Image (tube, rainbow, N blue to C red):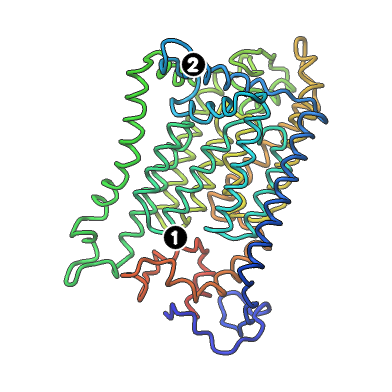
Amino acid sequence: MNVRGDTGNKEDTASAPIGQRGPHKPLSAPLSPVGRYMRRGLEVCLLIAVLVGVWYVMTDGWKLVSQDVDEYFRYAHAFWLEHPHFRSLPTEYPPLAIIPFSVTLLPSSIDHHVVFAMWMGLLVLVGYAGYVRYSTRQRAVTWIIYLLLGTTAVVLARYDLVPALVTLAAVWAAQRGQYRLAYGLLGVGILLKLYPGFLLPVMMVAEWRELKQSPHMLPAGKSRWHVRGHRLPLVSMGLDASVGVLLALVGFGVSFVLSPHGTMAAFRYALDRPLQAESTPASLMWLGSVLGVPMHAVFSFGAYNAVGPLDAWLKPLSSLALVGGCCWVYWRQARGQLSLAQATLACLCMVVVTSKLLSAQYLLWVLPFAAEVAGVDALWIAICLLTTLEYPILFDASFRQWTTTYTTPYMLVLAIRNGLLLYVTVQATLGRSLSRASHDARHMLALSSADTLSARLDPPTAISPAPGYLEETLSLRPEERRAVDDI
């Protein structure tokens, strides 16, 4: 395989079938330094204008006042300013969540809702820059579109954007072979929000497959099972994974020393919660109520929940579906049927769709990888629009009446949204999550990126990259990999 990207003639390739070599279109001339700075400046100004518009829609249009930000502020104030210092940890969040909560105090002269929105807006800019630097500008724009369509009400008022981008950074690091950094970032993500723990096996399987399929990394005269200082792939993978596991254990250990009650409360809080009204199991319970099985709403644990005779069955089935679904993803990835990015998207979708808890901000966990893997996809656009229709548009009108009954439009929208989520979860697990448009775009990206492949590989491996390493580097589907092999 020629990794230098020598392509011969430079004619148009848009009509060449996937899997067949075609002529190449010349790349456009690079912008001058001044042009690049001007474009970046315009992008930043446009994003800032969009974020300001999001803030005014949220506060002046929908009249949303985030009680979550009030809670963040109280936790941060108690931890940093009240006696005894550094002892009052959040009772329903992992310990490192106190860091993003603390930005509500900086600066203290401005209302903490505005301060938190400013910091989250800055994080959106950082995420956009990360996409441009480590992925593509097209995916960066896609991510922003998804945020606007599905999370306008929560993107500047919840801290879930922090663990979401930490998780995305971990995947980018792993795609570049920096697995210890990737595991460390996952450890940080677990300390921020527990859900990145489900991605540890995804990362481990990705590294294991890369080590097995990378004979160019072997010392001379050694078998393909001995890499990285003559160690077995499983040993090397385990040592790298221990970075993230130890980081998470140390974080929880320090938290337990500072506040035993606060550390254990996050786990008890998650276990004791009933089915949240927006979750897929709650939608099944609502469908049961249509058939005559009673169901009613209860406000507890800071959310509206669904309670009825079916919850005794749906809660354990939800847990079984979560474990079984994640194992299905790990198995398909281990068989080489999912790339790292695809497996990450499938696993996160599985966590969201099978969990007994689901809120609008949970979409922030998944959207970065929907943009990374699926691109602009009609199903994801529909999921985003239905989520915004559910919260906040129908939420306020519905829950004013929930002291006595449910509103059918609200629950129907939730059922449709959750059904679509279930569908894209299955499609992602089967490796069919790419729309045709994004599929073609990724194929063209692979063809035009062959001449830069050497720069993305470590210097010792740039001469003859193994197929397994190339798969995880570009996250290509089989027909796309065949197209690259033809170069």
Q: Residue 259, labelled with which disc? A: none
Nearer-the-camera pick, 221 or 161 = 161
Assign a secondary structure to mark 2: loop
Q: Which residue is drawn at 67% across and 32% down?
A: 154
Q: Along the horizontal axis of the image, is 236 left or right of 264? A: left
Mark 1 lies on residue: 472
The alpha-carbon separation of the residues under discs 1 and 2 comes to 46 Å
Rendered position, 95 above or below 121: above
Nearer-the-camera pick, 342 or 293 = 342
- List x then y, in percent, for residue 379: 70, 48
Rendered position, 254 above or below 241: above
Q: Which residue is drawn at 28% across and 66% down?
A: 217
- List x then y, in percent, for residue 408: 80, 24
Nearer-the-camera pick, 329 or 258 = 258
Q: In which quarter of the image is residue 395?
A: top right
Q: Along the horizontal axis of the image, is 201 left or right of 217? A: right
Whichever of labels 1 and 2 marks the residue nearer the N terminus, that label is 2
Mark 2 lies on residue: 81
- List x then y, in percent, for residue 473: 45, 62
Q: Along the horizontal axis of the image, is 266 left or right of 399? A: left
Rendered position, 131 above or below 224: above
Q: What residue type is labelled 2?
A: Leu
